[in-house]
Image (tube, rainbow, N blue to C red):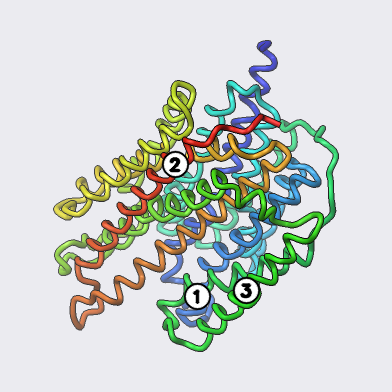
Amino acid sequence: MSRGGASSSRAVVASLAACGLVVSMMFTLVMPLLPRFPALLQASVGNASWMATSTMLAGAVATPIVGRLADMYGKRRMLLASLAALVTGSVICALAPGLAPMLAGRVLQGAASGVIPLGISILRDRLPAAQVPMAIGVISSTVGMGAGAGLLAGGLVVDHLPWRTVFWLSAAVGAVSATVAYAVLPSAEPAGRGRVDWIGSAGLSVVLLGVLIPITKGAEWGWGSWFTLLALTLAVLVAPLWSAYQLRTRHPIVDLRGAAAPPVLLCHVAAGFIGFAGVANFLATTVMVQLPTSTGYGFGASLTTVGFCLLPGTMVFLVLSPVSARLVHARDAAFPLVLGSLVMGAGYVLRLNATDSLWHIAITSLITASGGALTFAALPGLLMEHVPRRDTAAANAINALFRAIGSALASATLAGLQTGFSAGGDGHPAGTAFTVFFVTAAGAALACALLASVVRRFPPRPNL
């Protein structure tokens, strides 16, 4: 490759990495503000909690739809549209006088979640095959880096600046990333195919919301509450009808036949386990570091301190993602996925006794994040070995959706364990809750390693 071509490739990777980092930050940037939102927005605690939940739900619904639209109408176009939604949502939040417009802005921010799978798909189209694994590693690293950076940046902003600065900051970095992407990414793309499956999109949205809303709010509402049961019932009723329609229509929003191919389906299930194991470390650290010292394992620290505890694990994504790419080149995509899953599992076992100091928390968190860095960078490469080029964006989007579902299950599991293992009248959970949580996360990591080992037995399909 010429020097100009190499420079162009580096610019594409850097631009897409910046976009992924910005989008990943949206989920954690507001966490330092969550305790303040009820007073700031004159809302109940339950309603204010939708400031975090709405973004996750919007991302889960939008990602597979945007992925399919990208395969039809162009990945660059949909990436820029997603970033435009992020910037618009950020400005709405910065100016919003109350909870309702603030939630609308957060939904638009979440709708940009498809940027990372879109970026991975663009890499497959634009880069030489030899450069793709390394570039995927860089893009995938933004998932972990953005989550940690968002929490730290949000804490620093809230501690020293007016709270709406958080949203002006996200609008600014989103606008800069979109401008750079517009200038750097090639505009010529293959002609689109098919049409928009609006009925399938609506059905998919109903099914996903019917499943994810109870997962994220069930502990708060009660698993036997009428709204939880209504949402789950709606999902159960709509899912078979939606599936039947997807199998019959010419241009489905989700290619169920392709997604059901054994290696592809196993990659998606593995993504769910990675989502659980990958976010469990972040969730547990966030809660444990803030709990009072009277619990026997908490540290009574601020969210800014949480951010610093997670910072080494955040940075390791950038360091180990290229290592994962080299392992892919030297062995295969399954090898770093298995290795990373086992490292994650070992990290959670070590976390069982990491309650003496913040340094212990930071070190064991770093070990767990190291495994996550290897897995996040390797899984897209393993998936693309079994997916035709024309369906790259949609397949990566579905994979990201499974990872989001796993992350939501981790959050719901921790919330349920905190409620189920109460330490007494002070409302704080017993240490047993975190013991069970870490063991469960280790099991999820081991399950991912087993699935990757099975996928490795399937031959890659031709790169068409």
Measuring from the top left, give residue 220's x and y in whole percent.
Answer: 42, 79
Along the viewing direction, whichever of 329 and 363 lies nearer the viewer: 329
Q: Is residue 27 above or below residue 190?
A: below
Type of the residue with mark 3: Pro
* Quadrant housing residue 121: top right
Compute the Cα span from label 2 to label 3. 52 Å
Asked where in the image residue 383 lies, by quadrant, the reply is top right
Residue 283, position in %: x, y? 36, 58
Q: Which residue is rendered at x = 54% and y = 62% of the image?
A: 56
Q: Which residue is mark 3?
A: 97
Specify few, some or many for label 3: CA neighbours under 10 Å numbering under 14, 14-19, or 20 or more.
few
Secondary structure found at label 1 = helix
Q: Nearer the viewer, residue 148 or 280?
A: 280
Camera-nearest residue between 153 and 333: 333
In the rendered image, is residue 320 in sight? yes
Question: If the image is split into quadrants, where does the C terminus sit?
Answer: top right
Q: Position of residue 445 (x, y in %)?
A: 35, 49
Looking at the rendered image, the quarter that the N terminus falls into is top right
* Amino acid identity at mark 1: Pro
Q: Could you say which disc has been placed on residue 361 in the image? A: none
Select label 1 or label 3 by which is in front: 1
Query: What is the CA distance from the residue labelled 1 to the residue labelled 2?
Result: 32 Å
Give the mark count: 3
- Compared with 34, 443 (above or below) is above
- Look at label 2 and name its amino acid: Val
